Amino acid sequence: MSVSPADDGLWCRRFHPAPEAAHRLVCFPHAGGSASYYHPVSAALSPRVDVVAVQYPGRQDRRNEPLIDDVGTLADQVHHALRGWDDRPLTFFGHSMGALVGFEVARRFEREGRGPVRLFASGRRAPSRHRDDNVHRRTDDGIIAEVRAMSGTDDRLLGDDELIRMILPALRGDYRAVETYRCEPGATVDCPVTALVGDSDPKTTVDEARDWQQHTTAEFDLHVLPGGHFYLNSRAAEVLKLLGEHFAARPAQRL
């Protein structure tokens, strides 16, 4: 697997490298999630789009590395790892926690004058909308109950004590990162933003998703799909269609 000059192969995963693609999609996982969550997206879009999925520390093959429980610090390191991957237009897609990380990484790229062409913010309320959930302060059983309620993790995994012990530190650290995140007042990106949300998501209401409009100086659109927090598990076809339309509307360009 090829890597960028700034990445040692830990952060950026390309499951289906598409070196001739005119566009690159960077995918940011949810809390407790990993790069492999986006393997089906990579398979569906390759070779038209080169898909890079970000792997955070503290999970899967990086489980022995220190966790990063601060969104700003995580965004700093992801931004550094993605340098060298911007030789073609970047599109960002982040789900839940990944939407916040994608937003902050986009801001860092824009400070250098090389921001993404669009940010897809999925299953996450706008950066300025805060709730006092404090899931990261719960007992282990409380965190497991929260994940089960979100239907984002296979119940077979949640029933395996050994696997649970492996993923709990990452879950708690990610929840801490999200729940302690505070957006800078007036923070925006200059790229267009597309917000996506499930119509029965207990973590993000339609109004909270619509408030992403306040965080872009460019165009904004909102897509409400049937489902809960992980609506995209059952609505993958609609999300892939939306991504496909985005890439089809953009001219082929290599930087």
Image (cartoon, rainbow, N blue to C red):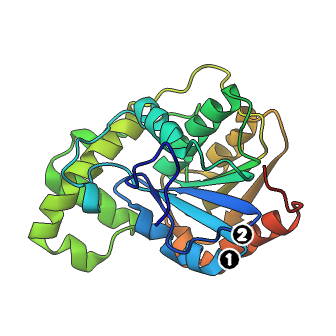
| Three-letter residue code for mark 1 | Pro
Residue neighbourhood size for the residue with mark 1, other residues' Cα within 10 Å, grouped as few (<14), some (14–19), many (≥20): some
In the rendered structure, the answer to whether residue 216 lies left or right of residue 159 reads right
The foreground one among 5 and 71 is 5
Separation of residues labelled 1 and 2 (CA atoms): 8 Å
Q: So how many labels did they put on this image?
A: 2
User: Which residue lies at the image location 50% right of the left edge and 37% below the top edge?
Assistant: 80
Residue 101: percent from the left, percent from the top? 51, 42
Image vertical order of residue 144 relative to residue 241, above or below? above
Q: Residue furthest left?
A: 162
Of the two numbered discs 1 and 2 in the rendering, the one whose residue sits closer to the viewer: 2
Residue 76 in view, yes or no: yes
The foreground one among 225 and 114 is 114
The foreground one among 13 and 215 is 13
Residue 132 in view, yes or no: no
Image vertical order of residue 72 relative to residue 151, above or below? above
The foreground one among 131 and 175 is 175
User: Which residue lies at the image location 55% right of the left edge and 69% below the top edge?
Assistant: 231
Please, what secondary structure does the residue beneath circle 1 have? loop
In the rendered structure, the answer to whether residue 85 lies left or right of residue 36 reads right
Residue on which the image places disc 1: 47
Please, what secondary structure does the residue beneath circle 2 have? loop
Residue 175: percent from the left, percent from the top? 34, 44
Q: Residue furthest top?
A: 185
Residue 50: percent from the left, percent from the top? 64, 66
| Three-letter residue code for mark 2 | Glu
Please identify the quarter of the rendering in which residue 192 is found.
top right
Residue on which the image places disc 2: 20
Residue 89: percent from the left, percent from the top? 75, 52
The answer to whether the residue labelled 1 contacts the one labelled 2, judged by CB atoms less than 8 Å apart, is: yes
Residue neighbourhood size for the residue with mark 2, other residues' Cα within 10 Å, grouped as few (<14), some (14–19), many (≥20): few
